[in-house]
Amino acid sequence: MLTLDAVSLFYGPIQAVSEATITVGEGQVVAIVGANGAGKSTLLKAIAGLALPRSGQIRFRGEDITQLAAHKRVKAGIALSPEGRQVFPDQSVRDNLELGAYSRKLSTVDLTRAIDAQFDMFPRLAERRSQPAVTLSGGEQQMLAIARALMGEPKLLLMDEPSLGLAPLIIKEIFATIRRLRDAGMTILLVEQMANLALAVADRAYVLETGRIVLSGTGQEMLQNARVRAAYLGGG
Ligand code: ATP
């Protein structure tokens, strides 16, 4: 569904990503793990069209999207659930969801149906549908960010650090949600510092170190890899 071929990105003179080659198959959950500043967010931005590679190619469902504008990628079926939630704070939960569907131009009936589908998936959001998003807890805001991304009915969901700043119990809930999405057939590219959780849910995984992919394999292989265990899973 998605391939990155030797993609490199720079911020001015700083190289953030070096020749990253990544494949995401339909229906897979693929994880990119790595430390702070490894280049994970930059890679997702490149796929979403928010940062342009200096070299390399990005293909989505057979088409070269390397230079395609971000809004056209949304239309093509790529949704980003951004780092740090970034919900619209003063808008209600329902309005946030509605904004997630804006590129689909739905009728009122279809829009209501799509929102209700998200409320089925995230009952806590349903209970809080009229509250401004700013009044939600961190975990609820993360759920809202995911639900809003899903409102566009994406073919590929990009998730940037869904665990960021959340309590362990809430993180578990978020990962349970990722499993449910996977079981429903969603294709997900997940960027995470919580390597243990990300690898446990991933079909495939890549380890990024200072902008370079240094290891890849199945999630299970990466969980058992000595180098991954030492660097990202607290030893053992
Ligand atoms: P984190 O988990 O902390 O978000 P990350 O793996 O997502 O880290 P990136 O945010 O992609 O890493 O950053 C990769 C590198 O690019 C870092 O060295 C960072 O300092 C640099 N960088 C990121 N954004 C910019 C920017 N707007 N201008 C200059 N350098 C940047």
Image (cartoon, rainbow, N blue to C red):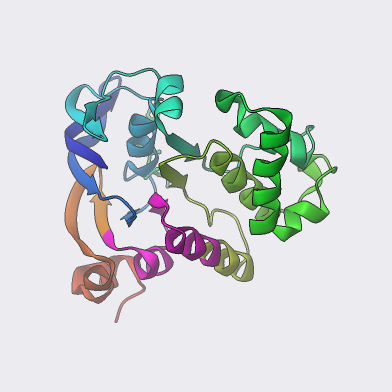
Foreground: 173 or 186? Answer: 186
Q: Going 39% across and 50% down the picture, which residue do you hit?
A: 188
Q: Quadrant of the C terminus?
A: bottom left
Q: Relative to 34, does residue 156 appear above or below in the rendering?
A: above
Foreground: 75 or 86? Answer: 75
**Span shown in magenta:** 176-204
- The percent coordinates of residue 213 (x first, y second) are 19, 49
Q: In the displayed orientation, state which residue is furthest to the bottom.
A: 236
Q: Is residue 4 magenta?
A: no
Foreground: 96 or 186? Answer: 186
Q: Going 38% across and 25% down the picture, which residue do you hit?
A: 49
Q: Going 65% across and 50% down the picture, which residue do you hit?
A: 117
- The percent coordinates of residue 60 (x first, y second) are 27, 34
Left or right of 215 in this view: 60: right
Q: Relative to 12, does residue 161 appear above or below in the rendering?
A: below
Looking at the rendering, the quadrant in which ligand 1 lies is top left
Give the number of marks: 0
Left or right of 79 in this view: 127: right
Q: Going 28% across and 18% down the picture, which residue do you hit?
A: 67
Q: Quadrant of the N terminus?
A: top left
Q: Is residue 191 magenta?
A: yes
Image quadrant assignment for residue 134: top right
- The percent coordinates of residue 20 (x first, y second) are 19, 40
- The percent coordinates of residue 13 (x first, y second) are 25, 22
